[in-house]
Image (cartoon, rainbow, N blue to C red):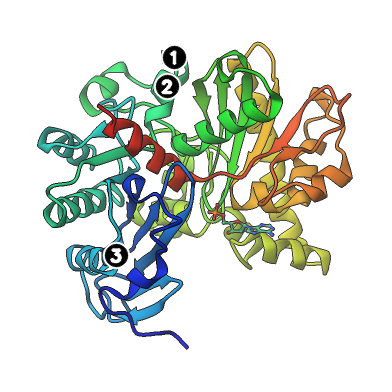
């Protein structure tokens, strides 16, 4: 049974002897209908408390805090949910607050200490991420009101990709659209791509700044990234997180003429077609069954032909995306799988490598089964021409570390 939460309950979770209290960072990920949080010591990587307020502004709004339990908070909005979350932290000392921000446009090529000017710039990117940035601004303002004395830092999904060269970030569109409306490729999942590539460099015992790596972040959203000498050179997502690979419910790349075709042929309006591409496509749309790879792998094993088709399309398009990114590099020192699918699914890694014969990978089946969510490591043989690794991502930890870095004088 869920326990009923009251502010202050959490204090008993913390052992002040074992926790270095001065480093704790509150990481906040404020989405359109949910608000996730975690208090992390970035040095020990210990998570002291974490939770989510979900289905905000609805009768079913719920606050879940691990390991305490859940509390119904009907119709609660972002600001009040933030206050409830902050109250649930009790006496845990916090050194700073790190906010995940999806879109930093061209304003931000690195994490930033938040002030009014920075918040206004995040707000100015709302047209580029209408579902995310307005919610981020609401969350940031609510947290700043509740904790005015603490430093607040924004960590951007787009920032890592600001090193992409113009030939990678320009669409072949009228140049004026870039000047007037900032239409260009931005890329996302930057904190994850950078984190797993750095971890891989440690595993390979080579400097991050001397490696050429392709990372594949495969979660509900999926993107791959070409990283050369520590910098993002190209990535599969673009202006928005719809471009590129096939995903859980997102189509990835389609012929842009498809939109008008569907408007004319199905009677949907443009908003409905955009929804179809974002919410009804990808693994879910192809299989007609689920956006969850676990369900599809099981169904395919039991002979579900459309689950099999969805998995095939997913792996083939991923391989094609990886080979496209090779154009940004001189060589591929390592291919890295991460994210819920990349970390947990040995069959998906194997099937993707099977489409990459041109890179001559030799899969080590035992290592592919052994490595994953809990153990990073190589999944190809030592003499394989392509080295492939699985490396668990930890975006919250990156945000906590970035926040701590910016707090240092
Ligand atoms: P993420 O967004 O990174 O949390 O990834 C979520 C996705 O990971 C889910 O939708 C599942 O498709 C996938 N996933 C999680 N566990 C497994 C597993 N054991 N095998 C295959 N896919 C998995």
Q: Residue at x 53, y 43 (%)?
A: 252
Mark 2 near ligand 1 (CB under 8 Å)?
no
Q: Secondary structure at mark 3?
A: loop
Disc 1/disc 2 C-alpha distance (Å): 6 Å
Whether label 3 lies within 8 Å of ligand 1 gets the answer: no
Separation (CA) of disc 2 from disc 3: 42 Å
Of 36 and 24, the residue lying toward us: 24
Label 1: which secondary element:
loop
Q: Pointer 1: what residue?
A: 165
Q: Could you tell me residue 128's position as x and y percent?
A: 29, 39
Q: Where is residue 32 shown, x and y percent of the image?
A: 30, 58
The answer to whether residue 276 is above or below residue 168 is below
Instruction: Write down the residue under mark 2.
Output: 169
Q: Is residue 142 left or right of residue 246?
A: left
Compare marks 2 and 3 and give the one earlier in the sequence: 3
Which is more N-terminal, label 3 or label 1?
Answer: 3
Please give left or right for residue 392 compared with residue 141 in the image. Answer: right
Question: Which of labels 2 and 3 is toward the front?
Answer: 3
Which residue is most to the top? 330
Marks 1 and 3, how far apart at CA:
43 Å
Dots 1, 3 in contact, CB < 8 A = no
**Residue pictured at 45% horizontal, 41% vertical:** 43
* Figure quadrant, ligand 1: bottom right
Residue occupying image coordinates x 65% and y 11%: 330
Q: Are marks 1 and 2 in contact (CB under 8 Å)?
A: yes
Q: Nearer the viewer, residue 257 or 408?
A: 408
Residue 172 at least partly seen: no
Q: Secondary structure at mark 2?
A: helix
Crowding at label 1, few (<14), some or many (≥20) Cα neighbours within 10 Å? few
Q: Name the one closer to the observer, 208 or 126.
A: 208
- The image shows residue 302 at horizontal and vertical percentages of 82, 69
Instruction: Determine which residue is flagged by label 3.
Output: 89
């Amino acid at each position: 049974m869920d326990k009923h939460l009251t502010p202050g309950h959490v204090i008993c979770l913390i052992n002040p002897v074992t926790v270095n209290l001065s480093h704790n960072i509150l990481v906040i990920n404020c989405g359109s209908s949910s608000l996730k949080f975690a208090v992390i010591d970035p040095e020990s990587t210990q998570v002291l408390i974490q939770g989510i307020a979900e289905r905000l502004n609805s009768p079913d709004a719920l606050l879940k805090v691990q390991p305490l339990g859940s509390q119904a908070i009907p119709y609660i909005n972002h600001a009040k949910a933030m206050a409830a979350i902050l109250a649930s932290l009790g006496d845990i000392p916090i050194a700073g607050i790190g906010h995940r921000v999806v879109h930093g446009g061209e304003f931000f090529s690195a994490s930033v200490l938040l002030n009014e000017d920075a918040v206004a710039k995040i707000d100015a990117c709302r047209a580029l991420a209408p579902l995310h940035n307005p919610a981020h601004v609401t969350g940031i303002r609510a947290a700043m009101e509740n904790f005015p004395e603490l430093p607040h830092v924004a960590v951007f999904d787009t920032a890592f990709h600001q090193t992409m060269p113009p030939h990678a970030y320009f669409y072949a569109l009228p140049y004026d659209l870039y000047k007037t409306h900032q239409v260009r490729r931005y890329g996302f999942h930057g904190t994850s791509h950078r984190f797993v590539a750095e971890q891989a460099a440690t595993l390979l015992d080579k400097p991050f700044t001397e490696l050429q790596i392709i990372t594949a972040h495969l979660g509900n959203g999926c993107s791959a990234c070409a990283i050369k000498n520590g910098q993002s050179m190209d990535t599969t997502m673009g202006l928005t997180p719809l471009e590129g690979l096939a995903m859980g419910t997102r189509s990835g790349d389609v012929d842009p003429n498809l939109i008008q075709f569907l408007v004319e042929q199905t009677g949907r309006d443009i908003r409905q077609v955009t929804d179809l591409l974002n919410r009804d496509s990808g693994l879910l749309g192809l299989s007609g069954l689920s956006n969850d790879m676990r369900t599809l792998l099981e169904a395919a094993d039991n002979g579900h032909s459309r689950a099999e088709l969805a998995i095939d399309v997913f792996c083939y398009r991923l391989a094609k995306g990886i080979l496209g990114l090779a154009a940004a590099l001189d060589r591929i020192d390592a291919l890295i799988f991460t994210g819920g699918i990349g970390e947990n699914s040995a069959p998906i890694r194997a099937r993707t490598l099977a489409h990459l014969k041109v890179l001559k990978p030799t899969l080590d089946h035992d290592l592919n089964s052994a490595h994953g969510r809990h153990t990073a490591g190589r999944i190809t043989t030592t003499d394989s021409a392509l080295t492939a690794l699985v490396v668990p991502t930890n975006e919250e930890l990156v945000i906590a570390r970035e926040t701590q870095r910016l707090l240092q004088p």
